[in-house]
Amino acid sequence: MSLLRATATIGGLTLVSRVLGFVRDMLMARFVGAGFASDAFLIAFRLPNLFRALFAEGAFASAFVPMFNRTIGRDRDDLGAGLRFAEGVLSVLLPVLLLFTAAMMLAAGPIVWAMTGGFPDGGPDKLALATNFTRITFPYLLLISLVSLLGGILNSLGRFWVNAAAPVLLNLCLIGGLLFFRGSTDVETARTQAIAVTVSGVLQLAWLIWSCRQAGVVLKLRWPQLTPDVRALLKVVWPAALGAGAVQFNLLISTTLAARFLPEGSVSYLYYADRLNQLPLGLIGIGIGTAMLPTLSRQIGRGEDVPAMTTQNRAIELALLLTLPAAAALMVSALPLVRALLQHGAFTAGDTIASAEALAAFSIGLPAYVLIKVLTPGFYARADTKTPVRIALVAMGVNLALNLGLIWSMAHVGLALSTAVSAWVNAGLLYWTLHRRAHLTLDARLRSRAVRLIGATFVMAAGLLLLNGWIDPLMGGSIIVRGLGLALLIGAGGILYFGAAFALGAFRLADLRAQLSRRRPT
């Protein structure tokens, strides 16, 4: 499967999940709003979500997939050798996850207090509610980590769609909770959401187990044993966790500062803005990064340095083609987008303005967030997880310094802007390091097309600025009117961008056809 086709497969299913996620967020905004109950739930969900991003989807996948592929290749494409390695990993991973989950649930109170300072705006009741929600949601980490192990195996076998489809179940569970099991108050409804998170983890694990069996993959439980291969994996997982999770750590820091020092609702403003910003990141960055890692690992393992560099160049080109317009659209049209998607029920016009300001700031870093996903496989495929960690720590330091400097003058917008700037620092250092080691040089095609893509982005942004004033009033109407307004905004932006990009020679249809027809190296 070609990089573009694999990315399209993952991105398409991620699109389904993200659309359902927005339906969930719209219902959450309507029934819970942005305040006491939503802040408590979002703090509770941030912890398992952080560890999921770090260990389950980030570090574990980044470390496990290359090692699984190298194990298969080392034994002359023997899948059995890879599955024995996976069984060894499972035997150690499961008891560690059980103990860690139990410890985090017992210590939920002190942990939530450390994150929030006891919620100065909401007092003991809000702290107790967030602690209760944390205990309900945290088993999700254990379940989703096992999902990641099985999904990593299927990704290595080229079955990307199975793992990409799993998050759909999370959103379906949360939507079902809001539609059919919500309470009579916002607190009861938020508690239903917390329960739905863990239920979704059970369903996702069941889905992956069934899909693995359909692919002939059955893992047996063994007595825990630290084999050399398992030790090697554990050695690289922890550094990879910090490297892959820099953006998540930055969001955690921002959320913590908002809970401690900013008015009630600020945590929710950052959450809703980040959710909109995450849509293109999920569709593009995660898709490209997941699709290119097995291919890049094989190319580097065979000593095919030139094809590996070409793979990285085309991945960066594809990332820029898709993220530059997304970032510009979220930046210049943040207000009508947030109004259309969230402003109804308990979510007020003031909440819309505050969330839109945060979204505009977050979107400045969108290309960088995606480039981080595209550049880090260049290290992981070479079994180097320490360098991304060092770079991530620098970026986190920049984020913290900017947070402390901007929170007092720009409130929650300063926190979002700090996250965006630190992402650019992270992406820039990743590229500079790969280039200095002669692992990545931007070829003439990428340099030329990047300039043209930037030009096309400016054309689109100018058009959207002119359109905003006319289309924003539609975004407060009925669902049908909002939908028409969104379709007009997105359609006009897409036509302007891709029309300008084609006219400027930023891409050619022949190149896209070639990518779609190219098979993945085996």
Image (spheres, rainbow, N blue to C red):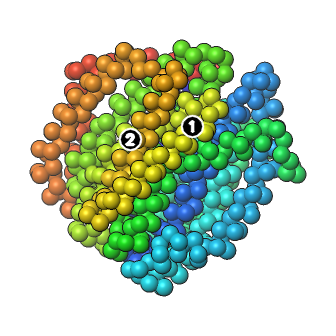
Q: In what element is the residue under mark 1?
A: helix
* Frontmost residue, 510 versus 295: 295
The location of residue 101, given as percent across then percent down, is 68, 64
Report the residue marked by disc 2: 424
Q: Which circle marks residue 387 in the picture?
A: 1
Q: Amino acid at mark 2?
A: Trp
The location of residue 2, given as percent across then percent down, is 52, 23
| Local crowd size for mark 2, using a 10 Å CA cut-off: few (<14), some (14–19), many (≥20) | many
| Local crowd size for mark 1, using a 10 Å CA cut-off: few (<14), some (14–19), many (≥20) | some
| Above-or-below relation of 149 to 335 | above
Numbered disc in front, either 1 or 2: 1
Q: Residue at x 44, y 23 (%)?
A: 314
The mark that comes first in sequence, 1 or 2, is: 1
User: Where is the C terminus found, in terms of image quarters?
Assistant: top right
Q: Which circle marks residue 106 in the picture?
A: none
Q: Is residue 191 visible?
A: no
